[in-house]
Amino acid sequence: MKKIGVLGLILLLFSNCAPTLKHPQLPKEAIEEERKKQEEVALFTYLEREERVYRVGLPLLKGALNFYNKKPGISFGVIVHSKNFYKKGQLEIIQKKYLVEDIPTVLYLHPDFGAYKSGLKINDKILQVEGKKIKNIADFSKVINSIDEKKERVEFVVERDGEILKFDVPVAKICPLSFKLIVDPQMRDTINAFTDGKTIFVTPGLLRFLQSDNELALVLSHEIAHAVLDHVQKTMGNKIVGSIFDIAIAITTGINTYGIFGDLGSLIYSKEFEKEADYLGTYILAVSGYDITNAPDLWRKMAAEYPGSTKDVFLSTHPSTPERYILIENTVKEIKEKIEKGLPLKVEFKK
């Protein structure tokens, strides 16, 4: 009885803080219908953003080959998908707009690359590539990755509206990098892009912030430059050297440094790496056909969003936004002078 009395007292206390306004009832059927609409908006918005990154970024991967000294990758400018890409609810949504089956079908075609120019279309079923049967996405990726970059054209066999068609698709050489849109809730709203040396990661927050494709291209070219210059591997190497000091101190003195030398090691040259990526990234932007005239303005826009970035902070991993503005401004002048003089757009490496 005492427990009932205490519970009643608690309910009485809460009743004094209860809502007081009358409002329309919320029918479960209407809520469910709206939920489906919002899930549809969310999925197609994700695909639109992914396609934007690919559309802007793929020409940069081609242009970056001018500065890449390793084995290139190849591209036909096509994105494919299949049923196993989607959850059950998503599959019902995506099939309102696209043909999605167990075998790969075309989701997107870049207008400047071979697949589109040779006549492939959205929703084509990919049956064969280079004479090899395609049953799933894994087959498609395996065949594409096995194609010799020296080949100039590759045969695609597709099914379109029940008709079997063959296309002779030109091969384009690119830097072997990929793009990925981040969906992690903890990161998606940040204004950020980064690379692990193999993939360029982009947040939805960055895409909302950069309304101009030219601005997005500058950011992507910066990350591509990091990969071309092996900055990720060099940073890890510096961290390992610093960690050796952490270990040595722990062994000889018994003092736990908590990885401070490893962290300091990863900071060594980090600002210089960023400057290199800004410099080379602007060149990649230019050779890829993008307008570089207003490229420096991105850093004024970034400073407005992050006022603290205007200061040169010791131990920061990035230069200040004024430094980055002036560096890119001078690089744009350098590139335009070379174009006017008919000189090749090349960069010099230290000996």
Image (tube, grey):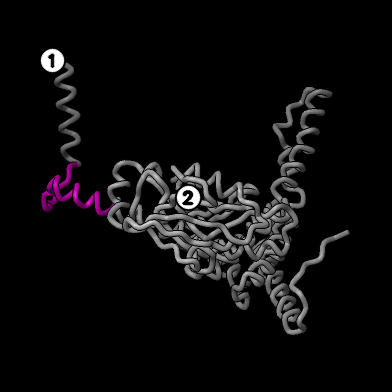
Q: Establish if 243 lies above or below 91.
A: above
> Hey, what amino acid is under mark 1?
Met
Disc 2: which residue: 128
Q: Disc 1 on helix, strand or loop?
A: loop
Left/right of residue 333 with respect to residue 50 in the rendered view: right
- Disc 1 crowd rating (10 Å Cα; few below 14, some 14-19, many 20+) is few
Q: Quadrant of the N terminus?
A: top left
Disc 1: which residue: 1
The location of residue 294, given as percent across then percent down, is 60, 76
- Which residue: 47% across, 50% down? 128
24 falls in the magenta region: yes
Choose top left, top right, bottom left or bottom right for residue 243: top right
In this rendered view, identify the residue nearer to me: 83 or 120. Answer: 120
Q: Quadrant of the C terminus?
A: bottom right
The location of residue 154, given as percent across then percent down, is 56, 57
Q: Could you say which disc has been placed on residue 230 in the image?
A: none
- Which residue: 51% across, 51% down? 129
| Start-end of magenta stretch | 18-38
The location of residue 241, given as percent across then percent down, is 79, 38
In the rendered image, the residue lying farthest to the right is: 351
- Disc 2 crowd rating (10 Å Cα; few below 14, some 14-19, many 20+) is some
The location of residue 326, given as percent across then percent down, is 70, 71
Asked if residue 45 can be seen in this view, the reply is no
State how far apart marks 2 and 1 are (Cα).
76 Å
- Mark found first going from the N terminus, 2 or 1: 1
- Which residue: 62% across, 75% down? 292
- Which residue: 32% across, 47% down? 90
Choose top left, top right, bottom left or bottom right for residue 173: bottom right
